[in-house]
Structure formats: C-alpha cells, structure tokens
Amino acid sequence: MSLVPEDVVWTLRGDATDQTLSLLVLPHAGGSAHTYAQWRELLPGNVRLLIGQYPGRGARFTEELPRSIDDLAGPILRCLPADTDDLVVLGHSMGSLVAFEIARALTLAGRPPRAFVASACRAPYLPNPSPVYPERLSDDELIAAIKERGGTEDGILDEPELREIVLPPIRADFAIDDAYRFTGEVESLTCPATVVGGAEDPVVPVGTLPDWSRVTSGPSEVRVLPGGHFYFQQEMAAFMSIVHAVLMTRHQFA
C-alpha cells in the first residue's frame, strides 16, 4: 500500500507568513494525531506543527498494524515535508522512543534537529520499567491498564463497538514499547535534549529521566512538573512554556 504523506504526517500551520521552524510531535502508545492537534492553538504563529500518525488509526486505519519501532518511525521519516530543515522533535511516552529514532536517523543523514524533547519516557537504551504485556491481557484487563495510565477518553474504551477499533492498535503499540531497547551507539544525537516528566508518574520514575543525557553530545536538561504519566493535561501552560523555550532557543550544537 502506497503512503499518502498528508495522512502519515499532519501539517498544521500557524498564522505567520514565515514558518520555517517546525515542531514534530510523536504520540504515545495507542495515541493518534487527533489527540495532539489542539496544540496548534498553543504554539507561536511562526511554528508549523507536524504530527505523526501511526498505522491502524485515522486515514491509516486499513494499514497493517505496526510490529516494530521501525514501522512507526520509518513512514513518518519518509513523509516529512521536503522543506523540514529547522526542526524540533518531541515525543510523549512511547512517542519519545519514536522521536529518538527519527532524530537519530536525521542526525545520521547530516540533518540533525534543532532540539529533541522526550516526555514521560525511559531512555532508549534502558528496558521498559513498566511493561504492559498486552498479549497476556484480556480486553477488560487491557482497558483497566490503559485507564490507570490515563491519556485516553474513558467513554471510547467503555463503548463495545469502539473497543474493536481502538484496542488492536493499542495492543500493537504496547507490545512494541515493551520490547524496544536501543542497542546501538548510545550517544546518537548532537542536538540539545530536554526531558520532561511528571513528579508522580507511576510508569516512568522521575529518577530515571536524567539517563537521557547520554543520548546526545549536546547539552541536556531535566524538567519535572506536578502530575502523573500524562502530567501535561493538568499542567499544559507550564509544559508549553518549556516547549516554547526549546523552540525559540538556538544552540551552537544544533
């Protein structure tokens, strides 16, 4: 099946004439581009928002479900707009691992991103501290695990007909997240890295967030906000303040 670039990478433009700076957002396990489209209203007008859409959801619903991190990152990398030169790459939860793979590939290609942001995720060279093992769970057990993490509207999970649509990609994503562990050269990036997490996150302990510093030769910082795994839902203003600072700062390392 041939990919339609606009279906793989959503492009949401701001109101400024000059939009050479882009923010690429990679969703969490089970997430979709729809979840992050509202961020457009929270970003500066000169920033173009790009959002990755994974297989099995949205206009990619009929595609085969992903089996590896490459199935998630590869199509997005290939479908980035041709003029995406000044780029910040951001992922949330499993999306941070997808973001790392994309940033790593761009760096290898001589097109390193301006900056990298990882949110609520372990460093890629570490094992998953909170595996879900979706293959062992019934639908009801999986839904309970999803609700415990947050980030998904309970009404969708409680509707039997919608379950049949949303659970297969969620299972696929969690299986990838469980198994993924980067075994290549740890220091794969050259750009600055910002790592953000929730102080009460039961999935990714905040004490593990500094481990991300090893993935880049550039500067790195860790920011902790109140909340759990989806801390930004309650701390959106503070989170966006961090994102804005990353977007507007240029480093000699980038």
Image (spheres, grey):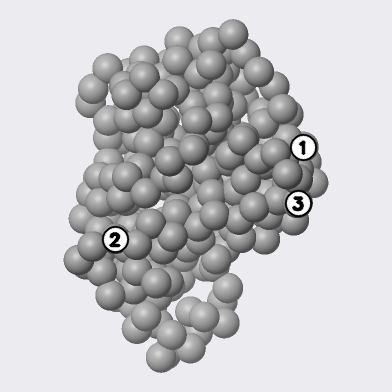
Q: Secondary structure at mark 1?
A: helix
Q: CA distance from mark 2 to mark 3?
A: 28 Å
| Residue 153 percent location from the top left of the image | 58, 73
Q: Which mark is residue 15?
A: 3
The one nearer the camera, 28 or 129, is: 28
Q: Residue at x 68, y 54 (%)?
A: 40
Mark positioned earlier in the residue sequence (1 or 3): 3
Query: CA–CA distance between discs 1 and 2?
Result: 34 Å
Q: Amino acid at mark 3?
A: Asp
Would you name the residue on which mark 1 appears?
Answer: 241
Q: Is residue 180 visible?
A: yes
Could you say whether the residue bearing mark 3 is in a helix, strand or loop?
Answer: loop
The quadrant in which the N terminus is found is bottom left
> Residue 241 vs residue 156: left or right?
right
Which residue, given by chain and number where applicable, does mark 2 sit on? 3
In this rendering, the count of numbered labels is 3
Crowd rating for badge 3 (residues with CA inside 10 Å; few <14, some 14–19, many 20+) = few
Q: Position of residue 26 (x, y in %)?
A: 47, 48
Q: Is residue 175 left or right of residue 148?
A: left
Q: Relative to 222, does residue 196 appear above or below in the rendering?
A: below
